[in-house]
Image (cartoon, rainbow, N blue to C red):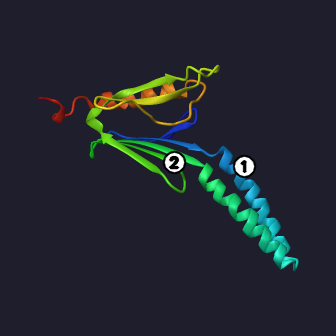
Amino acid sequence: MRSDFGKMKVSERSPERLRLTYLQWYPGVLIGIVGAALLFAGVDRLVSGAVLEGAAVLLMAALPAFAICAVTTRRVTLILDAPLGIVHVHNGPLTRRRVRSAPLAMLHGAEEETDPQSPYAMKRVLLMFEDRPPWPVTQRSFAGDGPRRAATVINTWLASHGPRPEDTP
């Protein structure tokens, strides 16, 4: 079941696991389109006999455009895993991702944070922990009610698990 929360999507929701995914694809796709056009231009030059021109277009323009596409497209995945008892936030470009993990038992819930400097009431989801500062799920903020709805889904999923045996004295 996939639910759309602005740009964040619930890609998996079960009693064992909740997975929210955000893909910031817009800059990467635009640069990828330019890379594809340059790729076709380079291949056209190669086929027409201008080998040096074609190779130059491919090596100096098309390949760097595809590399920039891979670096600028960012993917964020939040995983709440009950069987493992872990919260994972995977964040970063497609080529290199950073993973933050914490015990699920320390996660108290999710809140939406409003950017005070934004004139458009931009918001993002924060994970609230017992023993550490809040974690933003995404570095980017969004307009609309998507972050509030994502925080509601996270809090509902957490509430459905109730107190875990290791949480009780």
The answer to whether residue 59 is above or below residue 166 is: below
Residue type pointed to by label 2: Gly
Residue ID at (79%, 66%)? 40
Q: Residue 152 or 44: which is nearer the viewer?
A: 44
Of the numbered discs in the image, which one, if any, rests on residue 66? Answer: none
Residue ID at (76%, 55%)? 34
Q: Quadrant of residue 70?
A: bottom right
Q: Is residue 6 visible?
A: yes
Q: CA distance from mark 2 to mark 1?
A: 18 Å
The C terminus lies in quadrant: top left
Q: Is residue 79 left or right of residue 70?
A: left
Q: Could you tell me residue 150's position as x and y percent?
A: 47, 30
Give the residue number, with chain letter if any, for mark 2.
92
Q: Is residue 156 left or right of residue 83?
A: right
Residue ID at (15%, 29%)? 168
Q: Quadrant of residue 50?
A: bottom right
Q: Residue 11 or 41: which is nearer the viewer?
A: 41
Q: Secondary structure at mark 1?
A: helix
Q: Is label 2 in contact with label 1 (beta carbons under 8 Å)? A: no
Of the numbered discs in the image, which one, if any, rests on residue 30? Answer: 1
Q: Could you tell me residue 113's position as x and y percent?
A: 49, 24
Q: Quadrant of residue 107?
A: top left
